Amino acid sequence: MSEQKINEEAVRLQHLQNIKEKGVEPYPAKSSRQNTLSEARVSPEGANVCVSGRLMTKREMGKLCFCHLRDESDRLQVAFSEKELDKEDYKFFIKNIDMGDFVEVEGTMFVTHKGETSVLVKKYTILSKALLPLPEKFHGLSDVEIRYRQRYLDLISNEESMRIAKIRSLVVREIRHYFDTNGFYEVETPILQPLYGGANARPFVTHHNSLDMTLYLRVAPELYLKRLIVGGFEKVYEVARCFRNEGIDHNHNPEFTQIEFYWAYADYTNLMDLIEDLIPTLIKSAGLSLKTEIDGQKVDFTPPYPRKTMRDIIREYAKIDIEDYPDQKDLFTKAKELKIEDIDKNTGRGKLIDEIYKTYARPNIVNPIFMIDHPVELSPLAKSKKEDSRYVERMQLVCVGGNELCNGFSELNDPIDQENRFKEQERLGKSGDEESMPHDEDFVRALKHGMPPTAGLGMGIDRLIKLLVNAQNLKEVILFPTLKPESK
């Protein structure tokens, strides 16, 4: 802590002592607020109001002091006058109440000579004494490290941060409303799991002492949600916190939130139809426009969205046909020619295809597009296409630099096929692929009891909000992102 802050805290501690010595409780349990600041603002002149908020500014002008209070609804000027208050109470306010303190005031509405709607204070009450100062001059907290680490200061001083947080809340509320009104049941599945699965990702590992067993934080709720479809549910969803032990960058955080749902008797074409209805609904619920600018590019979320196979997209941008390279060795050689990074001779064919797509195609995508029909190696839980078993019935909605908004597919419900794919994932794991899935024998057992044709989809809420508010970093839309340890 800087010397200046230490001195400021010492001054405020003295003010706190002065308040206590006067017999005033500096941290009362309750407020008597009758009006929000936005309600007071539209009240007629002369109306009596009782408002509360954080003291944001304080300008002393002799026997008059103009301040601004802020609550969640608004920011409003309040005027303290020695003429209206007891002389000692006025002096006490001037000397002991600091910016950042929470204050309640009772008074009457009036309009200043400059036309500013204000409250003429008749009585004030301290609600909470702040012992540390707010960001200097209140023009906005600009230190990114402090903004993410001390989000409370960021929300106080940056209106855009508060706006983003509220947009996120509105979108999550609308997601629940959308699925509830369309016949889905919201459920909860385990976060601590004996086997991780449902996505290709490295898990977080923990240990349960009483049971003396290794557990994993879930990477996805998929396999448990599909067990519920086996059990008789036909439409289920979960707003799920998921955890993947991966790097941190502008598009990744080790813990994130997604909506994942499963829909019996549907396939991936039904998913695309639903998403074309859901995405515009969510955008409008947040008060945003379907036509916007993201990363300097004009983007239109008005449906319908084009549907192109992954093979065709790679052929368009990388100028190769993946069918010309049917085995891993040949494709690895071609990938090296294309200067694909982060691969080696053990990299599976599916991952090679994905890296070629990410390098050549993804950066060129702008408007929303459904990328469909992925190679089977990329999708161990998706149903193969009847006309060509090398590909699966999978869709991803991508836009603006290939940002993936959602990922869904016609679910694999053949237990024998599923077991074989798990064995292939197990083989990849033994060869060094840290993101391969383990063999989940209980899930295969569930499928052996029969699961109807089912479609399932996951959509990352963090990435969706990042895109909609045109944020440059995922940390902007996560209230408390994962950070390196704070340097002392």
Image: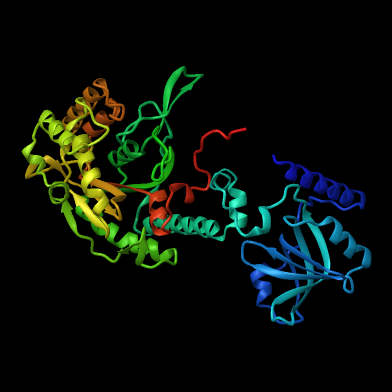
Quadrant that contains the C terminus? top right
Residue 109 position in % (x across, y down): 75, 77
Q: Quadrant of residue 424?
A: top left
- Which residue is found at the position 62% from the left and 55% from the top? 156
- Which residue is found at the position 58% from the left and 45% from the top? 146
Left of 9 or right of it: where is 82? right
Residue 133 position in % (x across, y down): 72, 50
- The vertical placement of 411 against 116, above or below, is above
Q: Quadrant of residue 116?
A: bottom right
Residue 238 visible (yes or no)? no
Left of 425 or right of it: where is 111? right
Quadrant that contains the N terminus? top right
Residue 194 position in % (x across, y down): 38, 26
In the image, 280 versus 359, the foreground residue is: 359
In the image, 216 versus 357, the foreground residue is: 357
- Which residue is found at the position 86% from the left and 47% from the top? 14
Colouring chosen for the image of the structure: rainbow
In the image, 181 versus 155, the foreground residue is: 155
Total count of labels: 0
Residue 446 position in % (x across, y down): 27, 32
- The vertical placement of 112 against 326, above or below, is below
- Which residue is found at the position 20% from the left and 28% from the top? 419
In the image, 411 versus 100, the foreground residue is: 100
Residue 296 visible (yes or no)? yes
